[in-house]
Image (cartoon, helix red, strand yellow):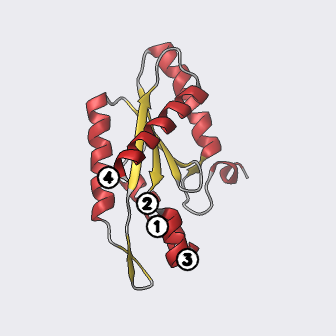
Amino acid sequence: MKQHAYNDVLTGLSNRRFFVESLEERVARCRRYGDNCAVLFLDVDKLKTINDEHGHAAGDALLVRLAEMLKTYTRTTDVVARIGGDEFGLLLDHLNADQVVDKIHFLIEQFGLEKLVHEGKILPLAASIGYCFVGPQDTTEGLMSRADASMYRAKGKSE
């Protein structure tokens, strides 16, 4: 039963509840030990258009494929979660800012190379990603708000 409480049914990833609890643990660890952790928010670009033009099954297929790619391109110690309809959250420990930016660029590049075919049509896979780092005075809510704002700034640049 606990498994279902923390998993997203569609993608098989962790869900928002698990993400928030994991972030709370990381905030406490960062305060206590001075560790670092990056909080990434990812938003799938043009999912509504894909759903409208190709149907929700196509949008779901895209979300599932993106989830698979995120799991493939992250470490087993990283947290990867679907936190909303077309939004994903990642918690990446022990990376500096340059490494996080490199990871973001790598993910965006991999998404762009992906050719997802659904019912004979190629669906574009693109995402906007924002991030922030856990600081000594941060709260879970504040971090999620900052990562979300960073993601929307990135989304504004990509459109």
Q: Can residue 136 be seen in this view?
A: yes
Disc 1 to disc 3: CB gap under 8 Å: no
Contact check, label 4 and label 2, Cβ < 8 Å: no
Residue 34, x across and y down, in percent: 43, 15
Q: Which mark is residue 55?
A: 3
Could you say which is closer to the camera, residue 32 or residue 138? Answer: 138
Which disc, if any, is residue 62? Answer: 1
Amino acid type of the residue tagged 1 in the rendering? Leu
For the point 54% across and 71% down, which residue is it?
51
The residue depicted at 58 percent of the width and 23 percent of the height is 139
| View extreme (bottom): residue | 120
Dot 3, crowdedness within 10 Å: few (<14), some or many (≥20)? few
The answer to whether the residues at label 1 and label 2 have Cβ atoms under 8 Å apart is: yes
**SS for callout 2:** helix
What's the residue at 60%, 29% (across, down)? 141
What residue did someone put label 2 on? 66
The quarter of the picture where residue 123 lies is bottom left
- Mark 4: which secondary structure? helix
Q: Which class describes the residues within 10 Å of circle 1: few (<14), some (14-19), or many (20+)?
A: many
Q: Which of marks 1 and 3 is in front?
A: 3
Q: How far apart are marks 4 and 2 (CA)?
A: 11 Å
Mark 4 and mark 3: Cα distance apart in space: 24 Å
Q: Using the image, determine if residue 143 lies above or below residue 156.
A: above
Residue 75 visible in the displayed image = no
Q: Which amino acid does label 3 sit on?
A: Gly
